[in-house]
Image (tube, grey):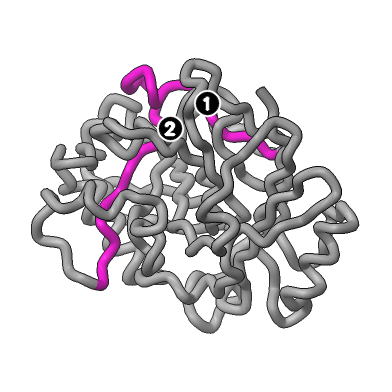
Amino acid sequence: MYDFRTGTIGLGVAGNFTGHLEQAGEAADFAAVSGVAACAPKGLFPFYALNAAERLSPYPLSSDRIRLPTGDAGAAVQIEPELALICQLQYAGAAVSGIVPTHFAAYNDCSLRITGATKISQKKNWGADSKGLSASHVELSQFNAVGSVDRFRIASFLKRGSEVFDYGIDSPVNGYSYFYDALLEWVVDRMNHQVHAGPLENISELLASGGKPTTLVLSVGATRYTQYGESHYLQAGDESWVIVYDAGNHDAVSIRQHVINGHTAIETASVLRQSVEL
């Protein structure tokens, strides 16, 4: 997997898939955030930023493992299946002027379910191997509804012993509330103007302290959970799977069979399989 340790900021979009925040128990966190349209995402959160707070500075991305946190024995950890966009950032002075997505990939915004967290980022990075990004990046020729990404879907599974469980609801990437130009314009605005409020943080401060990073890993938002995924947390020995696949070449049944068979090389798909470890 490409190493994004330098020249990179990692940001996630909160509330970009209807119903996920309620399932994750996070909807109430945004009650104090004003001026957000009902259909819009709730805000941006950082999961990796250079020269930032201690909780954001460890490099969290892994393509093959999730390490469970050791400091809180009662912490519950869930897969968050998402699409990630790998983008180049453009600046005009200190402000971000544009975002150019170049690739996309399967992403696991693996998250702690803990009480008392005042910022979303406190649930996102507990050290090395606390996030997942597939080593298989799909090149984007164009990021719009006529481009190939519009055919893709997001599926996720938990493999426990010999059993495979559907973890997230198989969902189209164009089912995001904000996508394509609407998403990019919104992210630029939030990177430049989001302030510390409720669970959110000032992103422009992180960009400045990080020396104006030129690469953005953007997790676009988690899909809804199945009933199983909503109520089951990761354990050592599990396998976490997130697959972003071309629905023109695969269907949900065939993708699930690939997981049962342990296939990580699937044509026209970005596959993220992570072993869960202590």
Q: Can residue 53 be found in the magenta stretch?
A: yes
Could you say which disc has been placed on residue 47 in the image? Answer: none
Q: Quadrant of residue 269?
A: bottom right
Task: Identify which residue is drawn at 15% across, 53% down.
Answer: 31
User: Dot 2 surroundings within 10 Å: few (below 14), some, or many (20 or more)?
Assistant: many
Q: Can residue 46 be found in the magenta stretch?
A: yes
Q: Earlier in the sequence, mark 1 or mark 2?
A: 2
Q: Could you say where residue 209 lies in the image, as x and y percent from the top left?
A: 28, 25
Q: Callout 1: helix, strand or loop?
A: loop
Q: Residue furthest right?
A: 261
Task: Identify which residue is drawn at 59% across, 27% down.
Answer: 68
Pick whichever, 154 or 217, lies toward us: 154
User: Residue 186 vs residue 35: left or right?
Assistant: right
Which residue, given by chain and number where applicable, does mark 2 sit on?
48
| Image: magenta residue range | 39-63
Q: CA distance from mark 1 to mark 2?
A: 7 Å
Q: Could you say where residue 29 lies in the image, as x and y percent from the top left?
A: 23, 47
Q: Callout 2: helix, strand or loop?
A: strand
Instruction: Name the main secondary structure of what is drawn in magenta.
Output: loop
Pick whichever, 178 or 157, lies toward us: 157
**The N terminus, quarter of image:** top right
Which residue, given by chain and number where applicable, does mark 1 sit on?
59
Amino acid tagged 2: Tyr
Amino acid tagged 1: Tyr
Q: Could you say where residue 255 lies in the image, as x and y percent from the top left?
A: 77, 67
User: Residue 10 vs residue 82: left or right?
Assistant: left
Q: Could you say where residue 150 lies in the image, as x and y percent from the top left?
A: 56, 77
Q: How many marks do you count on the picture?
A: 2
User: Residue 177 vs residue 119: left or right?
Assistant: right
User: Residue 90 vs residue 172: left or right?
Assistant: left
